[in-house]
Image: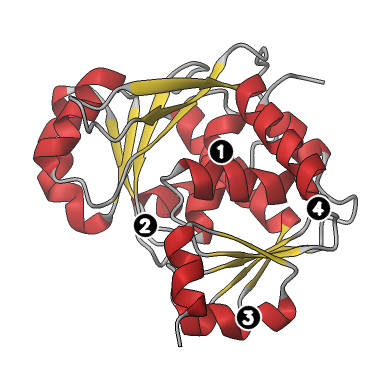
Amino acid sequence: MSASLFARLAERFPAERGRVAIETAEGAAVTFADLLEHAGRITALFKASGVAPGDRIAVQVEKSVANVALYLAVLQCGAVHVPLNPAYTPAELGHFLKDARPKVLVCDPGSEAALAALAKQGSAWLFTLGADGHGSLTAQAEGLPSDRAVAARSGEDIAAILYTSGTTGLSKGAMLSHDNLWSNAATLHALWGFRPGDVLIHALPLYHTHGLFVALNLMLMNGGRVLLLPRFDARPGIGLMARATGVVGGATFYTRLLAP
């Protein structure tokens, strides 16, 4: 088996691909088969756009099921995922694009006009993806056959670049390999005792290491169900706890949950 993180995650998906992988706040159920189909179409679009293994794909979009499929597609075609905070302004984004030199930039439809010049300056393809799952990325991928080929990657190849907070200077890109991300998820899976029947409340952002490389990778390799919330809200979170077996969050989550 390839050392690709995608290949190792998919190998742990349930044999019954019709099992639910993600349930949205609106109650929509997305199966593992749905995720693979969607990721395969985005992979086909990336390949048609000239994306090759090792190319960087910068992603500045809101949390959604389509964002999860996009993440899987980046891994599937062997590219490098560069998640960026949707709150970054075009001026701030210029630093990350100049440093990462992405082949593709995916942004919110509302930011397309402001970022078009930056993308052109860096010779990057520009696609859009909204929080509702609509945008040029999904529109152009929709008519393509789902590509199921997985790019061969070694464990030492870079899977993602995660930028630091920049508190002491300009943000720096931390390069994370396929082995790094797999080892992190596998270690937490063993220590926390997750099982395929587990259900996780996911209220963390997908541009952050905790939401993407801890919570999401962990549940994908676990083959369990994710209750995907757009953001943290204590009241809905408490309401979902009767249906979940776990929640991953930060200190502010827990203090708000305990507040009277």
The mark nearer the N terminus, 1 or 3, is 1
On the image, numbered disc 3 is attached to which residue? 240
Q: Determine the residue positioned at 30% across, 22% down.
A: 172
Q: Nearer the viewer, mark 2 or mark 4?
A: 4
The residue carrying mark 2 is 62
Residue 132 sits above or below residue 116 on the image: below
Q: Residue 119 in the image: x percent, y percent?
A: 20, 31
The Cα atoms of the two marked residues, 4 and 3, are separated by 18 Å
Give above or below for 163 relative to 12: above
**In the image, what residue type sits under mark 2?**
Glu
Q: CA distance from mark 1 to mark 2?
A: 17 Å
- Assess disc 1: are there few (<14), some (14-19) or many (≥20) residues with their C-alpha within 10 Å of its C-alpha: many
Q: Is residue 26 visible?
A: no
Q: Earlier in the sequence, mark 2 or mark 3?
A: 2
Q: Residue at x 25, y 27 (%)?
A: 171
Q: Is residue 16 left or right of residue 135?
A: right
Q: Identity of the amino acid at label 4?
A: Phe
Q: Image quadrant for the N terminus?
A: top right
Visible residue check, residue 140 = yes
The mark found on residue 119 in the picture is none
Name the residue located 73 percent from the left edge and 79 percent from the top edge. Answer: 243
Mark 1 or 2, closer to the camera: 2
Provide residue 26's location: percent of width, then percent of height: 53, 80
Residue underneath mark 1: 73
Q: Earlier in the sequence, mark 2 or mark 4?
A: 2
